[in-house]
Image: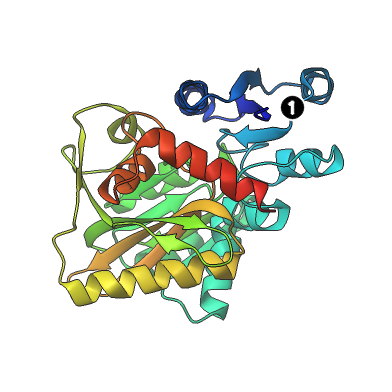
Amino acid sequence: MSPKIGVLLGGRSAEREVSLRTGEAVYQALQAIGYDAVKIDVDKRITENLKRQNIDLAFIALHGKYGEDGTIQGLLEMLDIPYTGSKVLASAIAINKITTKKILLYEGLPTPEFFTITRSEYINTADNISAKIMSMGLPVVIKAPTQGSTIGTSFVHLQDEIRGAIEHAFQYDPTIMVEKMIDGIEITASVLGNETPEVLPLIEIFSTTGVYDYTAKYTVGLSNHIIPPRLPDSVQQTIKDLAYKTYLAIGCRGLSRVDFMVDQNGQPYILEVNTIPGMTETSLFPDAARAAGIDFETLVAKVVELAMEK
C-alpha cells in the first residue's frame, strides 16, 4: 500500500500564488505515479488539518515565509511527519540571504560584496548610507533578504533610485542588504540528493526583458533557459563544484537550487540558495532534471524517495 502524501501548498507568504502552481504540478504528478495524494492549503488550522488527514509524508511545495524558513519543518518534526527537502536549520539559514552569505564567506566560497542596513540605521543615517552605496559603486542590488522570486528586490543604476529601493525592501524585512551587482551571465545549479548529492546540468538564464525579475520568472516567453550554458567547460565545472560545496555547507537535503552570476572574467559568484525550488511550467529545476534525462514525474518520485531516507 502506497503512503498517503500531503502536498503542502499556498501558505501566507508573498509567494502564495507561485506555491499554488508548484503544489498543483506536484499533486498531479503524484497522482499520475499512483500515490494517494491530497492537497493541504497551509493556514492557521494547519496542525488540526495535518492530524485529520493522517498523512504519511508531507511534500512541501511552499515558498517564502512559514514554508521555506524552517517554520513548517519544525511543526512537522513535532508531529513526527516525514517531509521533503531540507530540515529546520538549513531551511532557516537559506531563507536569509545575509546569513547564507556569512556562511559562504566563512567557508571561503565566492559571493558578491555586500553590507546590511537596519531600519534604525537608515532612519538615523540615511545620507551616510547613500554615500556608502555610492562608494561601493553603482549598479547595486538592494534586497529584502528573506524574500524569494525577487520580491523586495530592486536593481539600482542611478543615485536617485537608492532611497526608493531601500524603502521598498524595508516593506518586507527589518534588515536589508545592499549587494554589488555583477555584470555577466546568470547561472543556476540544481542539486538533488542527501549526503552525496548530484549537481544536475547547469542552466543559463536569459531574460528578454533584461532583468530576471518576478514577471520574467513566471511569464511564459519572457525568459529563456539555455542548456548547456554558453561558458567554457572549465568554468561550468567550477560552478558545479561550488554548488556541491554550498549545498553541503548549508546542510541541504533532498533538493535545492544554487544561483550564480559569472562575471566577464569567468569568475562565478554565489548569490543564494533556494531550498524549495519552484516546480511550475516555467521553473528551472524541472528543466535541469529533464536535461539529465529525468522527467517531471520521476523527479517528484525521487524527491519522495530522498525524504523517506531521513
Q: In this orientation, does residue 193 appear? A: yes
Residue 223 rendering spot, x and y as whole percentages: 21, 38
250, above or below 303, in the image = below
Given residues 34 and 232, the one toward you in this image is 34
Q: Position of residue 126 (x, y in %)?
A: 52, 55
Q: Which of 164 and 225 is in front in this view?
A: 225
Residue 265: name its quadrant: bottom left
Picture residue at 40% right of the left edge, 65% below the top: 270
Q: How many labels does the image show?
A: 1
Q: Residue 252 appears at what percent x and percent y?
A: 58, 59
Which residue appears at 61% of the width and 34% of the height?
59
- Please, what secondary structure does the residue beneath circle 1 have? loop
Residue 95 lies, with reference to residue 242, above or below; the image says above
Name the one closer to the observer, 140 or 32.
Answer: 32
Q: Where is residue 48 in the image (x, y as percent from the top left)?
A: 84, 20
Q: Is residue 39 left or right of residue 272?
A: right
- Left or right: 293 as drawn, with respect to 66: left
Residue at point 16% right, 66% down? Answer: 231
- Left or right: where does residue 30 sit relative to residue 174? left
Q: Residue furthest front?
A: 1
The residue at the point 43 percent across, 41 percent down is 299
Residue 4 or residue 182, whichever sits in front? 4
Q: Is residue 102 visible?
A: no
Q: Which amino acid does label 1 sit on?
A: Ile
Q: In which quarter of the image is the N terminus?
A: top right
> Residue 90 falls in which quadrant of the image?
bottom right
Q: Residues within 10 Å of mark 1 (few under 14, many from 20)?
A: some
* Mark 1, residue position: 55
Taking the image as shown, residue 253 lies to the left or right of residue 167, namely right
Q: Is residue 86 above or below residue 180?
A: above
**Up-down: is 148 above or below 281?**
below
